[in-house]
Image: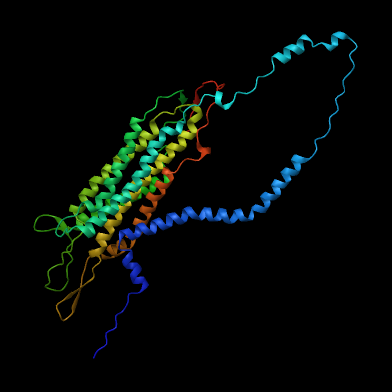
Amino acid sequence: MSLHILALPSPIDLAAAAFTLPMFSLVIAALIVAGILLLPRLRNRAGGAGGVTGAGDAARSRETTATAPAPATVTVVAPATDPAATRPSASASTSLSTSPSPAPTPSTVPALPSATSRYRPEHRALGVGALAVILVFAAENIVRGYLLNLSDIVEWWQYATPIFAAVLCLAVALTLNVLSATPQERPVLPTTRRTWLSFSPRAGLIGASAAVIALLGTTIAAGLASSSDDRGRFIYLEIPVPNTQIEPLRPWFYGWDFGVPVLISLAALTLVTWATLRRNAMRPYLRPETVTAERHARVQIASGTVAIATAATLLALGGAFRFIGRYGALSQLTVGNDGATYDLAWQYAEFAAVARSLAPALEITAFALLLSIAIRLLSRPAPGRQDPRPQPSARPSAQPETAR
């Protein structure tokens, strides 16, 4: 009687298997973002416990200062020898009558609408759109992977879905920008010419450009390496078995039938991103005193736009890397019951192995960007960031703007 022992997988094997699922990358990204948000609060609580004693001492010091007796003042009044001196003079009566009136109460100051309120619909659209990209990506992954039987069907939408969702999100934000155009209340003299780069984050643009170039290069290279089936679909990768009579292997691959929809979606994403950034920069400011507040709101819109475009591109790139690494990293072939093993030769096998390892990191980065943008744009602005309201006595004047 033989005894068979069931070998349990190691934690490393379980972690490697978990990272093959895109939804696990979403969980890791959510934990990272939650940790980044909670860490400052925990530090503030830890620092607040030590500052209670100092606050108590400061309060007691203020109480002591408030209860200290004020120094006595002595007023010397000279006796009046002339009866006319006891009557108020004309100048005195005039000074009394022209004394400044009390300052108007806040209710008498005309309340002007907040200049940054016209940017709130775009902030909400970008924040909700970032969450929508995550939900659409997750829904497509679950429905395609667990609910549908798609054997022998080219699932071209799998890699274009996050990019197409980002295109719709940015198109909605651009539409709100155009529809919510507000006329300028007072002229603001421009100091420099504004372009679509004026409010865009430099680091974000560099990252977005790198992601677009990587996805573009990967798609074109994989399409050139792919081969067609008997129906003319470029969905295969021919991997030869050298020094044998065995036919080349033909596993499914990220060929032109998968890559062309991605290239079309990527072109549309680039165009709508540029249009959103340009429209965000070119619209005029309302008033000279609201330039700073409006500039901050426009920076938020530009950074959210670039982050959503970058995250969608990274999600598509991560999916392409998973597909390429799934079969492109094959190195050996076992034939027959005798266990004969043959080496496979594909010149880009090392790249496929590296791509498979990088795919989870790209997805985690994309999900973290989307979650961070959604939290930042959907949260209420701090009171200090509201635009200052001009006093009624301020004269309307044209001042130069300080935007880049």
Residue in view at x 15 percent, y 64 percent:
250
Residue 285 image offset from top left, x and y in percent: 44, 29
Q: Is residue 81 left or right of residue 167?
A: right
Q: Is residue 235 above or below residue 87?
A: below
* 211 and 309: which is toward the camera: 309
Residue 201 seen in the figure = no
Residue in view at x 25 percent, y 60 percent:
324
In the picture as drawn, the residue positioned furthest to the bottom comes out as: 1
Of the 4 image quadrants, the one containing the N terminus is bottom left
Of the 4 image quadrants, the one containing the C terminus is top left
Q: Is residue 307 left or right of residue 351?
A: right
Q: Is residue 387 above or below residue 398?
A: below
Q: Is residue 133 left or right of residue 338?
A: right
Residue in view at x 27 percent, y 53 percent:
139
Q: Is residue 1 left or right of residue 387?
A: left
* 295 and 391: which is toward the camera: 391
Toward which corner of the image does residue 62 lie, by quadrant?
top right
Q: How many marks?
A: 0
Residue 329 seen in the figure = yes
Residue 25 image offset from top left, x and y in percent: 35, 59
Q: Is residue 366 above or below residue 346?
A: above
In the picture as drawn, the residue positioned furthest to the left comes out as: 230
Residue 358 image offset from top left, x and y in percent: 34, 60
Render colour scheme: rainbow
Residue 21 image offset from top left, x and y in percent: 30, 61
